[in-house]
Amino acid sequence: MEQLKHECGVAMIRLLKPLDYYEKKYGTWAYGFNKLYLMMEKQHNRGQEGAGIASVSLNNEPGTEYMFREKAEGKDAITEIFSRVTQEMAGELLMGHLRYSTTGKSGLTFVHPFLRRNNWRAKNLCLCGNFNMTNIDEVFQFLTSQGQSPRIYGDSYITLELMGHRLDREVERLFEEAKAKGLKGLDITRYIDDHVEMANVLRKTMEHYDGGYVMCGLTGSGEMFSVRDPWGIRPAFYYRDDEIIALASERPVLQTTFDLQCEDIHELKPGEALIVRRNGESHLEQIMPAQKLSACSFERIYFSRGSDRDIYQERKRLGEQLTPAILKAIDGDVENTVFSYIPNTAEVAFYGMTDGFRKLHGEVRTEKVVWKDIKLRTFISANTERNDLAAHVYDISYGSLRPYEDNLVIIDDSIVRGTTLRESIFKILDRLHPKKIVMVSSSPQIRYPDYYGIDMARLEEFCAFRATMALIEESLTPNPSPARPLDACYQRDARKGEGSRYSQGQQLIDKVYHLCKEHPLEANHVRRIYEPFTVEEINEKIVEMLRPKNMQAPIELVFQSIEGLHEACPNHPGDWYFTGHYPTPGGTRLVNQAFVNYIDSKQRQ
């Protein structure tokens, strides 16, 4: 419902036969580009701000171009870049990228792939990825301490320069090795092209990084690679046969493009790289030691296409597991309850939810209550007009429930900021006059930012955080009424003579602020602000904050539990946005800094 942007989608193809083989067999010189186009369109959900492609031809003569790149911005970028493809761009190595920005930086300059040119074929590097690095300051300092001066401050460009530097060193190593073997002239060049060890380059590059990534690249001499972060945060899948090697961010993309079964496709393991040499030989190599698996659970809940065999079943389980909590919220009155969902990503969880109720109660009443009509047009600049338009992004099916008699249970995949609920959903649902609205999230409360590729960077964006801070700040008013949570949890920390709720609330904020500022790598100290409150207490405050004025129907929120999440998605335990348990030091440092920034901004107001 509330669009989250994700960085990004990748696609790679290595043609293992001569180019005329594919033209004879498949009837077109553009076989590789056609497959790349399909792979990118099937991942359009992963990035609509821009797209880019690159190709490398292995046999072009000196003096002719052998490394090509096209980039474009906007939702139609894929169509635009492929319309520019010509036969002279045909190559054995193909790479594509779809971009969503998580940094706020936009423009063609920031669209992948990035290209580093050199007169030596082996030193040319083209790079793209699905990544976000949490320690880019340190990497930048490392580069500049060596005398380099990156033209742009950003993780993509800095990674290109760092990896390009390591590729230069690898080529120079081979140059000296070839000379020691007595080779001269073009024989040295051929030796270098045939012996580049990308594993050396990747190890020397990726050892500097903290973050989630799938990094993909091509070299001018014909090396192709993709490497996954040691925690397995970002996903990558690959397929190999005697004609092609292909890699994508999602498994169904490969299945559809090449007509494959699930079992034909393999997932790149944490810290592992798929490396394809100039001669087409491929192998897997462990680049970084695998760390504790932290595969992103949001991939399963929201980002990846629901057509994946396992994701489809996981989303159904996420819905079904909420049955007991929903049953409690409607006081067991299934007969007088209509079940629905927010289109379109929550549809599969809706099937699971209704399956759960059918197992317990037989047939249930389901309706498509909410329709998504239009997209918010950014050319309307006035806030009041924008808010009015946002209120009409969704519409309802009038007459879909009995006024004042039926409960309405409506499921979404996640509740993040709450803006759409407040400005649109709750208002239009109230027009149906339900007896009660039970708003269900198939994911747990989102409490913390993501720093590994999702555009959730500020704590104040989350309605769960805002509600929790509101509960704490209510205790800062003079002589507040007693409230159990802060008393129960923090009276043990109150110094003698400072046991009032006012002092406890202020102590909590001050303590967390101090710990975040002075000990940013020790732990995620922001978790402490949630300790005094139950999920239900935070839910009630969220409802109070998001409930539109003059709304009649009562509202109750039901969130997935952490335990339910892990039961439904057992192979994707990464849950830092829900629990605050970041897999890397960089994530912990950044969330603590986010709290410091939040408090500092509040004090400046």
Image: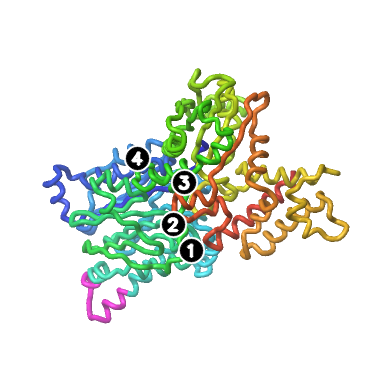
Tag 4 residue: 78
Task: Assign a secondary structure to mark 2.
Answer: strand
Q: Main secondary structure of the magenta part?
A: helix
Q: Between 470 and 258, which is closer to the camera in this rendering?
A: 470
Left or right: 494, with 214 as reference point:
right
Q: Which residue is mark 2?
A: 213
Q: Rate crowding at label 3 as few (under 14), some (14 to 19) or many (20 or more) other CA atoms within 10 Å.
A: many
Pointer 2 local density, CA inside 10 Å: few below 14, some 14–19, many at least 20: many
Q: Give the residue furthest to the front.
A: 361
| Front label number (1 vs 4) | 1
Of label 3 and label 1, which has the lower sequence position? 3
Does residue 385 show up? yes
Q: How far apart are the alpha carbons under marks 3 and 4? A: 17 Å
Please tell me whether mark 3 or mark 1 is closer to you in this view.
3
The amino acid type of the residue labelled 3 equals His
User: Which residue was labeled with disc 1?
Assistant: 209
